[in-house]
């Protein structure tokens, strides 16, 4: 099955297999003379095309889990499979390929380069993919169109509202045509109206087949997800139906 985004092929999806499969995932850190357990034996599966939020108290393991899902870190024990690749055992080159081409990232801080236009900021995210100039130009235009900013392509971040800057950041992430978008408090710096604006953009992308995994403290954001997870003391619980 092929999911299309803005009229172009985005993903080839095997509906029989989860996108993520985490089995026995533990992550520990050493702090001076003691070992801190951030994640304690997590088992979860996330389906392709799902919209999942992760909530929990500060220090409960949310950021650690997101780093593992984003192939920014490796577990101390267990397996983190994205498709057929186990992040725990894959080579550095394979992990780098996953981050560059299959995973999109959006953060609370927009992380835009202030001297570049919206289009140039989106284009920066395509540099690792080895695309031609024409391919990059096409993808930038498509991505800005998807987030409703085609008319702001030549504007720099200082000329955009906070919500528009976050939409540029989303466009930069989705221009890669990733399999999953990981968002860490994507509405944390926005007021209520801008929060809803960003959620509408994310939900539209999810409706087109893009998997969303969002860490949030905002219950209004979590309520919009199809599946809600809670992380506390390194353990995960599915609270979707509570």
Image (cartoon, rainbow, N blue to C red):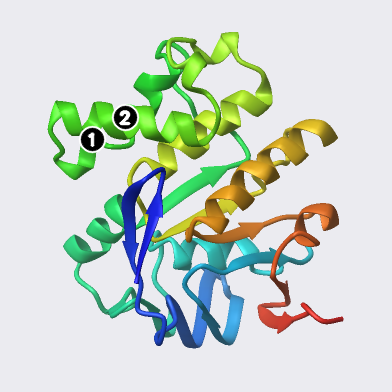
Q: Where does label 2 land, which residue?
A: 124
- 224 vs 29, left or right, is right
The percent coordinates of residue 226 (x first, y second) are 69, 69
Residue 160 sits in quarter: top right
Quadrant assignment for the C terminus: bottom right
- 175 vs 149, left or right, is left
**Secondary structure state at the residue bearing disc 2:** helix
Identify the mark at residue 127; answer none if there is no mark.
1
Residue 233 lies, with reference to residue 102, above or below; the image says below
10 Å crowding of disc 1: few (<14), some (14-19), many (20+): some
Residue 121 lies, with reference to residue 6, above or below; the image says above
Residue at (57, 10) in percent of width and height = 158
Could you tell me if the residues under marks 2 and 1 are in contact, i.e. CB atoms within 8 Å? yes
Residue 235 lies, with reference to residue 200, above or below; the image says below
Quadrant assignment for the N terminus: bottom left
Q: Is residue 110 visible?
A: no
Residue 38 sits in quarter: bottom right
Of 168 and 112, nearer the camera is: 168
Residue at (46, 36) in percent of width and height = 171
Residue at (24, 74) in percent of width and height = 90
The percent coordinates of residue 43 (x first, y second) are 55, 88
Tally the numbered discs: 2
């Amino acid at each position: 099955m092929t999911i299309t985004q803005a009229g172009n092929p985005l993903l080839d999806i095997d509906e029989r297999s989860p996108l993520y499969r985490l089995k026995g995932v533990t992550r520990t850190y050493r702090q001076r003379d003691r070992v801190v357990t951030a994640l304690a034996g997590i088992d979860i599966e996330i389906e392709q095309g799902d919209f999942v939020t992760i909530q929990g108290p500060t220090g409960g393991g949310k950021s650690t889990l997101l780093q593992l899902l984003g192939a920014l870190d490796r577990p101390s024990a267990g397996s983190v499979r994205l498709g057929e690749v186990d992040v725990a055992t894959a080579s550095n080159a394979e992990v780098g390929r996953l981050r560059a081409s299959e995973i999109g990232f959006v953060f609370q801080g927009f992380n835009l380069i202030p001297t570049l236009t919206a289009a140039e900021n989106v284009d920066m995210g395509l540099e690792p993919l080895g695309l031609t100039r024409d391919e990059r130009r096409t993808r930038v235009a498509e991505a800005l169109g998807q987030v409703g900013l085609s008319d702001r392509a030549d504007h720099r971040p200082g000329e955009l509202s906070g919500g528009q800057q976050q939409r540029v950041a989303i466009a930069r992430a989705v221009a890669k045509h990733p399999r999953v978008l990981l968002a860490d408090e994507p509405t944390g710096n926005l007021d209520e109206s801008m929060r809803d604006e960003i959620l509408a953009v994310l939900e539209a992308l999810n409706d087109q087949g893009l998997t969303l995994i969002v860490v949030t403290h905002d219950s209004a954001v979590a309520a919009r997800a199809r599946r809600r997870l809670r992380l506390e003391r390194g353990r995960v619980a599915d609270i979707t139906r509570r």
